[in-house]
Image (cartoon, grey):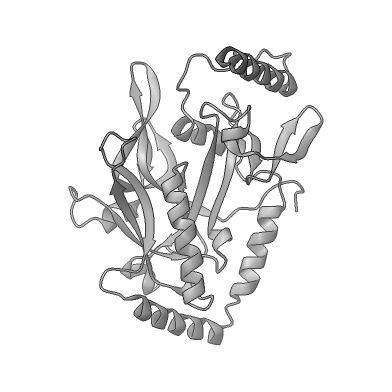
Amino acid sequence: MLKGLAITPPVIGRISIGRVVERNGKRLPEKDDEFTLTSQVQGLEGWVRHPLDAALRKDATAKLRSIPVRLVFGAPELNLRASFTLFDRSSGRPWCVGDGERCKRVTEQGIESLPCPTPVACPLGQDGRCKPYGRLHVRVITPEAETGAGEDDGLGSFVFRTTGFNSIRTLAARLAYFKAVSGGMLASLPLMLRLRGKSTTLSHRTPIYYVDLTTPPGTSLEQAIAQAAEVEERRQQLGFDQWALDEAAREGYAAGAFEESEEEGVAVVEEFYPDESSQDLPAPQASQGIKAKLERRVQQVQRSGDGAS
């Protein structure tokens, strides 16, 4: 097996609540008020829709705001990956990934482990360069998948990516609570991925959409737990080892320093880390190293602080 390569869950599609559009000669992210399921293939018009997108809609014009799902893993932190992440905009490579206490950062000396003060207090992570970045892996469940006639293979996942704090916080809480009340049967619970909206003074009263995880409509929490118990019993009879699956995923995540590959990072930067200001770091020359770029950014922040005082 290759060393230094993170082994992440197999992805067969994407779940998004936005898209990248062409505007005034620039490709910019645009928010949406519904889910879209896409494949991992991009065409001239953007990401190609997955066949399940049409299957889940009541009709072609219906808004898709809920998706029936099950989780792949029994541990919340394996289903939802969240970290403060700073990408190199030119290459799509992660530069710095942290959890608020420690971070892994690319430097001239290689990848170093350093303190992580969060983007608010870190001079390298301000101005939107470093954000909370979450990835939720789920299995999309349809009636065909339940009977074994659909595309669901039991391990392939759809990934929902977000830099929205509301989505990350809500999903993290739901996963922890569902695991607790179900006695650890998180991977067997029937669940529904939902799109919710709220307004704040910062949003000027316009809706902000975020993602939540609940039991399906008409299914109480007690009923969902009862269904999960039936699934658990059937799996045990078949020899399905959820604990071993979780351990394999945990080892795979830990095998590499960063989970996002360079080719994935380019698309992530375009959609979630738009270049919102022209006073960003100057375009790096071929001879400039990462250390020089980071040092220049620190000097910019220091000068800004001196002027403000």
Work out whether residue 42 can be spotted: yes
Q: Nearer the viewer, residue 43 or 168?
A: 168
Residue 150, image x and y in percent?
A: 38, 65
Which residue does the image show at 36% across and 36% down from the upper left? 19
In the image, taking residue 73 as reference, residue 216 lies left or right, namely left
In the image, taking residue 191 as reference, residue 175 lies left or right, namely right
Above or below residue 309? Residue 187 is below
Above or below residue 240? Residue 19 is above
Which residue does the image show at 67% across and 40% down from the upper left? 116
Is the N terminus in the top left, top right, bottom left or bottom right quadrant? Answer: bottom right
Residue 27, image x and y in percent?
A: 40, 24
Q: Nearer the viewer, residue 103 or 123?
A: 123
Work out whether residue 157 can be spotted: no
Which residue does the image show at 45% across and 22% down from the upper left? 276
Q: Nearer the viewer, residue 206 or 190?
A: 206
Residue 75, image x and y in percent?
A: 57, 66
Residue 18, image x and y in percent?
A: 35, 39
Is the C terminus in the top left, top right, bottom left or bottom right quadrant? Answer: top right
Which residue does the image show at 70% across and 54% down from the upper left? 254
Q: Residue furthest front?
A: 309
| Residue 302 location, quadrant | top right
Above or below residue 54? Residue 230 is below
| Residue 284 location, quadrant | top right
In the image, taking residue 119 as reference, residue 187 lies left or right, namely left
